[in-house]
Image: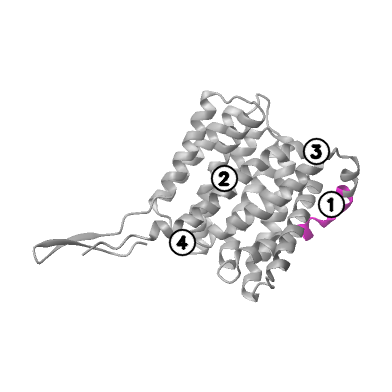
Amino acid sequence: MSKAPDTGYQKEWPAVAAAAVTVVLWASAFVSIRSAGSAYSPGALALGRLLTGTVALGAICLIRRVGWPPRAAWPGIAVSGFFWFGVYSVALNWGERLVDAGTAAMVVNIGPILIPLLSSKLLGEGLPRPLLWGTAVSFSGAVVVGLSMSDSGSASVLGVVLCLVAAMTYAGGVVAQKPALRHGGPLQVTTFGCLIGAVACLPFAGALVSDVADAPLSATLNVVYLGLFPTALAFTTWAFALARTTAGRMGATTYVVPALVVLMSWLVLDEVPGLLTLAGGALCLAGVALSRRRPRPAGSAVVATGGQASRETSPAD
């Protein structure tokens, strides 16, 4: 009797592919934020990015005739939209102006640690060992990358606090978005979350108008790029993947971002990384791979049946 194929990994591949698109685009966002941030203030940059993303996502919803999300999805959409799309964007843009990239990376990467802790308490997802070990390994890699990229000067206390706010709002937004995806589709949740974030950033509308008038075309094009790809596309692929796995595992996946930023800086900005930076990037990748391993079944026993051995396993957690 032929053995039926294990489709578990086959079903997971679409989520893995979607997560890969997300982390690549989010990594590219760091380069664009640095470029646009020289001409746009933190709030104006966040508002311009979110407005661009909202217009693009809204057009897709109209073309595909995607309606309003169900009522049950709105609490998660509102929380993630305000904190993750809105507060996170402004805090990160502002924080990166006050601290070096290495310090910002280390502080913001507290977020993926908070995600499994919050999801285990609020969503009942549990804390499997591979996720815990993978998170620890990846965070150590992020620290190594951050130390290798940090400037010799002292970091701004306000900058560190802002990056910490970004980490906490990122973690809270992910955990809030997960239950919303049980009721609404990824495109719905992303579109209306982005809209709420844009509305939250409307107090910066005056600054945006002023910055657009004075900014060079290259900086404005970077804002448009941030809205179309790291926001509209990447947040949608993120929601697609999050709907198909746990918040904790998705949070650990974002530890690939520091390694990709190092690679992109090398290829695009001709910034040759040192051995310590490369070692930290390798740790980030190794930790993500470890976090996505499936825990072994809780118990197994070999039972003899008709002279042949068959394995009975208990359901995986």
Q: CA distance from mark 2 to mark 3?
A: 32 Å
Compare residues 135 and 290 and report the one nearer the observer.
290
Q: Name the mark nearer the viewer: 2 or 3.
A: 3
Q: Which residues are magenta?
A: 198-208
Amino acid at circle 3: Ser
Give the residue displayed 77% in from the left and 54% down from the top: 52
- Residues packed near mark 2 inside 10 Å, few (<14), some (14 to 19) or many (20 plus): some
Amino acid at circle 4: Glu
Query: Which residue is the site of mark 2?
Result: 110
Q: Secondary structure at mark 2?
A: loop
Q: Of callouts 2 and 3, which one flags the residue occurring earlier in the amino acid sequence?
A: 2
- Residues packed near mark 1 inside 10 Å, few (<14), some (14 to 19) or many (20 plus): some
Q: Position of residue 197 (x, y in %)?
A: 73, 58
Which numbered disc covers residue 204? 1
Query: Which residue is the site of mark 3?
Result: 218
Q: Position of residue 243 (x, y in %)?
A: 53, 62
Q: CA distance from mark 4 to mark 2?
A: 19 Å
- Residues packed near mark 4 inside 10 Å, few (<14), some (14 to 19) or many (20 plus): some
Looking at the image, can residue 113 be seen?
no
